[in-house]
Image (cartoon, rainbow, N blue to C red):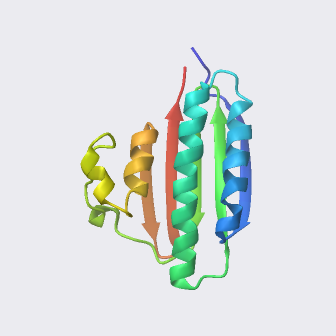
């Protein structure tokens, strides 16, 4: 069984610009791939989920006219990865996000936006959203053994 002992933390602070999304995906993929017990398909899931979270954070900064950086922290242990994406945007009510059809359901194609949170939940073992006055933290967790 894998250890829960911390291996390390990778932190990345990016300008709130879409041009930096590839960097976020690359850094997360490289950091998580350093742990040989993480299956490649889980690395792919995590890269997509963090891309969705970072996109939402960048959009939140744009909507709130915030000129600050988006922070991504990747906490790695021998049995899990926890990613935290933090923004200083206006926040949102996670309960107001409508339930969408299952990912495999063809009705899903009728939705052009609003799928990010649902997709993050589908791709990770745990997705939490913490909204406060100073912004939002999205926490993505993937377990592996």
Instruction: Give residue 7's quadrant in the image.
Output: top right
66 versus 94 height, above or below: below
Residue positioned 73% across, 47% down in the render = 27
Image x and y of residue 119, in percent: 41, 48
Is residue 139 at all visible to an observer of this figure?
yes
Image x and y of residue 34, in percent: 74, 30
Residue positioned 61% across, 27% down in the render = 40
Residue positioned 73% across, 55% down in the render = 23
Q: Nearer the viewer, residue 98 or 138?
A: 98
Residue positioned 60% across, 19% down in the render = 2
Direction from residue 73 to residue 111 in the image, left or right: left
42 versus 96 height, above or below: above
3 versus 45 height, above or below: above
The number of discs equals: 0
Image x and y of residue 11, in percent: 72, 53
Quarter of the C terminus within the rendering: top right
Quarter of the N terminus within the rendering: top right
53 versus 47 height, above or below: below
Is residue 101 at all visible to an observer of this figure?
no
Direction from residue 70 to residue 133 in the image, left or right: left
Direction from residue 114 to residue 16 in the image, left or right: right
Direction from residue 141 to residue 27 in the image, left or right: right
Q: Nearer the viewer, residue 33 or 5?
A: 33
Image x and y of residue 16, in percent: 65, 71
Residue extending farthest bottom: 65
């Amino acid at each position: 069984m894998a250890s829960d002992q911390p291996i390390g933390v990778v932190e990345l602070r990016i300008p709130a610009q879409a041009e930096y999304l590839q960097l976020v995906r690359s850094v997360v993929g490289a950091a998580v791939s350093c742990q040989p017990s993480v299956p490649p398909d889980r690395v792919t899931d995590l890269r997509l989920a963090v891309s969705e979270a970072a996109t939402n954070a960048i959009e939140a900064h744009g909507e709130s006219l915030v000129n600050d950086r988006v922070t991504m922290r990747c906490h790695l242990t021998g049995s899990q990865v926890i990613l935290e994406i933090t923004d200083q945007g206006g926040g949102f009510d996670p309960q107001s996000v409508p339930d969408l059809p299952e990912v495999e359901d063809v009705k899903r194609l009728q939705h052009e936006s609003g799928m990010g949170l649902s997709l993050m939940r589908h791709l990770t073992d745990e997705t939490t959203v913490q909204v406060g006055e100073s912004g939002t933290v999205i926490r993505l967790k993937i377990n592996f053994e």
